[in-house]
Image: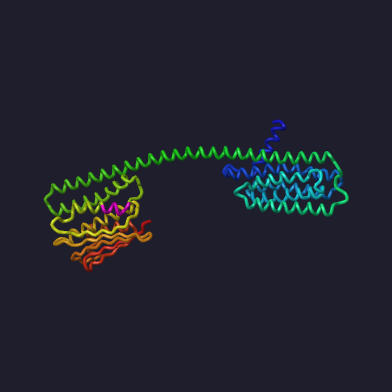
Amino acid sequence: MNLLDKIFDSYTLLINKGVSSDSLSHDKFKIRGLNFMTLIWIPALSLAPAFCYHNGEWIYGSIMFTSIAILLSIFYFNRIGNFKFSTIVYLLVINFNVILVNVIFEFNFGTFLFLFPLFACFSFLFPLPKNKNILVLIFTLMFLLHGMSFLLISLYPSENLVLDSNPLFMQLNYGFAFGLTLMIVLMYSILQSQQKLELDSKILINEEQKLLLEETLKDRNILLSEIHHRTKNNLAIVSSMLNLQRNQIESVELQNILLDCSNRVHSMATVHQKLYEKENFTKIDLKEYLEELIRDLQKTIFPTDKEVQLILEIDSFNITSDKAIPCALIVNELITNSIKHAFENQGGKLEIKIKKIGNQILLMIHDNGPGFHYNAEKNHLSLGMTLIEALTEQLNGQYEYNTKHGTTFNLSFKLI
């Protein structure tokens, strides 16, 4: 490895101090920019203490050299992730040195030209329009500090300058000031180009990932749609088989049992039908689902010789399938019980109300039949009550019966 390669490796190592692979492109841009400007200011500012030492001004030279050495701490603070503190160190040290240089040489020999690369640095660190207020504040303070120092030098000039007329020193200052400004502008353009390339690369990767996710989501939706469609068909087949079996037996009691089973299976099948029809495989509209379910029950179990007035008040809201199925099975069970027992001898009124209050769901089913004597221990033995209790537990809800003035069933559970 030759000398140039070693220099380049050292430069790369220093300019990337504090830059990690998981850093945001904007953060990389700022950290590399600050490291770069620190590197180019150190040799530029070292020119002044070198001339001070050469002319025997050891105090001025030592102060400037010490303050310039502090700039090396910027790499350390960037490495430990404290970019804000390293920025403060940079602004204070550079500004202090430029003011000190101008005061020592009384704004002669072109030292005032170092203000231009200083302005370029601040514009680089705090670009418009995002940092407008910060940039205006820094420029205002700079103008005040440098303006006051120039005013003091003009009012109280020293008898002996650190350097007398020295064309070489003046030309070096011109060259360094111009070179610094040019390097900062070029580096700003290069880093912006690198940042744009990184952003373009990330955008391209994100677009590819987005397309892949869309394809995966599309395949998933197709698969879920097929699963729900087949589940609905299978449950419909089971329901049809129960109905066929019901038509082949003579016992009325067995026919009613098979009809109840068929309706329960149909309630579950309807959920899967709604899921794949709406292409929403997690939630369905409870109002739409229950209204269709109740219409089907009207066709199958409602009496034709007696008038049953049906009153529906169901709020429209989405509910997950794991809550919709037990809720529908409870409604199916209660409607079946009312049709069988409340309206056995005559018609009547059946009310079904479901309200959503915040995260709470309130279900009420009331009939004006003769009612029945509810006993938790006795009724627990029936299949219907066993199902209602199990489904209520599945919903993490609570229910109660009121058998005064007909039969009223109240159920409450949380939506989420």
Which residue sits at x=22%, y=58%?
335
Which residue sits at x=16%, y=59%?
307
Q: Is residue 283 above or below residue 168?
A: below
Q: Is residue 289 magenta?
A: yes
The image quarter containing residue 28 is top right
Q: Magenta stretch: give its range.
A: 285-291
Q: Is residue 405 left or right of residue 39?
A: left
Q: Is residue 267 magenta?
A: no
Which residue sits at x=24%, y=55%?
332
Q: Where does residue 242 sit, x and y in percent of width and height?
A: 19, 47
Q: Where does residue 246 sit, x and y in percent of width and height?
A: 16, 49
Residue at the outermost right position: 159
Q: Is residue 181 above or below residue 353?
A: above
Residue at the outermost top position: 2
Where the C terminus falls, by quadrant? bottom left
Q: Nearer the viewer, residue 189 or 358?
A: 189
Q: Where does residue 219 sit, x and y in percent of width and height?
A: 38, 39
